[in-house]
Image (spheres, helix red, strand yellow):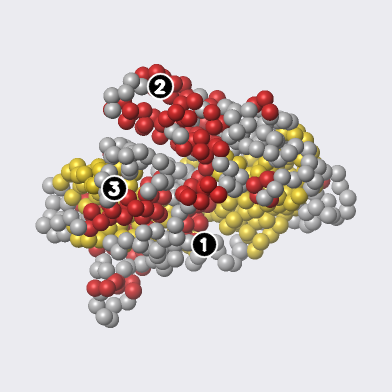
Amino acid sequence: MSQVQHEPITLPDGTTLRATVHRPETTRPAPVVLALTPYPVDAARQEMGESELVARGLAVVVVALRGTGASEGVFVPWARHAEDAHAVVDWCARQPWASGAVVGWGRSYLAQAQLYLASTGHPALRAMHLGVCPGDPVEIIYRGGAVVLGSALGWATAMTRGELMRAAARGEDVTAELEEWEALASDPDAAARTAPLADVPLLARRFPAWREWMTHPASDPWWGQWALPPRHAVPTLFVAGWHDIFRDLTLRQFAEAQHPGSRLVVGPWGHGAPAQAMGEVDYGRAAARGAEQLGAEAVEFLVAHATAPPADTAPADATPADAAPAFGAVTGPRVRVFVMGENTWRDLAEWPPADTVPTPWHLAPGGTLQPDPVHGEAEPSTFVHDPADPVPTIGGPNLFPRGDAARATGPWDQRPLDGRADVLRFVSAPLAADLTVIGDVVAHLCAATDALDADWAAKLVDVHPDGTALPVLDGISRAREVLGELVPPGEVREVAVDLGATAHTFLAGHRLRVDVSSSNFPRFDPNPGTGEGTGVTARSAFRVAHQQVRHDGRHASRIVLPVAP
């Protein structure tokens, strides 16, 4: 029978972390699968499939990060993770029951903790399995200069409850604050409308990182202290979802993985467990089979690397794959992506694929989207942005407390927004043939505002023959952040809006559509038009802005699609 123990791990500064250790019943030294979590330890144990890993002869060690769970100290997001993780690996490697080999596991914040560990270059670390993986902290809180509000607020709220539970365990009376927390958690949209955002009272008291995030814009050098250090080459299995909020960060981490044994799998999934359906789309049994296969492949990946002899003890005639098996040699291709629309898996040699062709589609007068540039003069398209009445979020790569059932995540029909005059829509003619897009999509908007600052939000939408309009990608750019300066009111500038990556086939008979607005709430905080963000701006200072998008012979507003052969 396997053994479960609760162990203290004392760090060099005297802080004690608490670990749960589940060991196989064997006299042989066991490799370690390590997870570092700020959440309940038992949840991580269940999610990582602890029993199966132990059955394969690996010991599972799950550690509550500093200041979380039963561990001592104060939790500050992203602080001291590298040094703490290095000390934990030291502890794992020197246990009398351990083989000295450690592999890492993590999803979401747990994956980010593994990235900090990888930066230490600890010799015991053999490989990592990372799902829905964040990147640099600034890119978690901000995108295109706008606050990724719904997810950041939801996470801060959840972490605040953990702090209240720790305070109660210390003997503090938190009854009133728990009631305050319930009110905050039950109506996250109301909390998201707080202005200034930095002044959400409970978060300001119990989760001071929130105020720091809201008062330091993305361009502030303050964020540099939390940046991920360069990491050593560690073979890593990355798993991403096309509808996950960390999709592009996971893809970027894979591109920077360096090790030839690393691998990437991207399915039509969100932030939760991979499944067959998301939003209003059922992607079919191919998506479900891919999710099922992925679970087994992940176990094989960890076992293969954990049990392989280290490179310096391999036979003299061994190949690098003998010393540390590449995952591709165990189960398949280096990159495997699910192509939505056609709903099939496609194997790629690299990400992004090198054989795509950047193909512009031009925004044109009359709300049309066309492959050819616009010539001559044309009146701009205009709309009015009211930050007190922002365009509501429907679908997209989100992580909201209210969940997918509330049209929060994935492909949801955009037609409920058709009555809004603050959204410009540019639609192509029906496609004569299938059009497959694989890679990063960028919109270039030649735009102007009469406010001191503006956000430019864009969506790529797949319009079906029956009129159903499902979002494929969305993005936003805060002009002062992406351009590095406040643009004089009325001055036209070209603003690039990064919509992120996809693998999607627009089927023949469908139409491409690009929606342009200045808000997408609560996915992002609305731009108050004052030259500063809602983190520090009172609602009384919000100003209505008159926006224009130019599309004529001198202003080529367009979206560039990486079209696959």
What's the distance in space between the residues labelled 2 and 1, CA to CA?
47 Å
| Secondary structure state at the residue bearing disc 1 | loop
Q: What residue type is labelled 3?
A: Asp
Frontmost residue, 89 versus 280:
89
Q: Is residue 189 above or below residue 414?
A: above
Mark before the other along the chain sequence, 3 or 1: 3
Mark 1 Cα-neighbour bin, 10 Å: few <14, some 14–19, many ≥20: some
Whether residue 266 is visible here, answered yes or no, is no
Q: Which amino acid does label 2 sit on?
A: Glu
Which callout, 2 or 1, points to the residue nearer the camera?
2
What's the distance in space between the residues labelled 3 and 2, CA to CA?
32 Å
Residue 399 position in % (x across, y down): 49, 38
Frontmost residue, 190 versus 45:
190
- Which residue is identified by label 2? 177
What's the distance in space between the residues labelled 3 and 1, CA to CA?
41 Å
Residue 381 position in % (x across, y down): 80, 41
Q: In this view, does 50 lie to the left or right of 214?
A: left
Query: Residue 164's quadrant in the figure?
Result: top left
- Which residue is identified by label 1? 351
Residue 347 position in % (x across, y down): 48, 62
| Secondary structure state at the residue bearing disc 2 | helix
Q: Which amino acid does label 1 sit on?
A: Trp
- Which residue is identified by label 3? 13
| Secondary structure state at the residue bearing disc 3 | loop
In the image, which disc is placed on residue 441? none
Frontmost residue, 18 versus 564:
18
Which callout, 3 or 1, points to the residue nearer the camera?
3
Q: Is residue 401 left or right of residue 63?
A: right
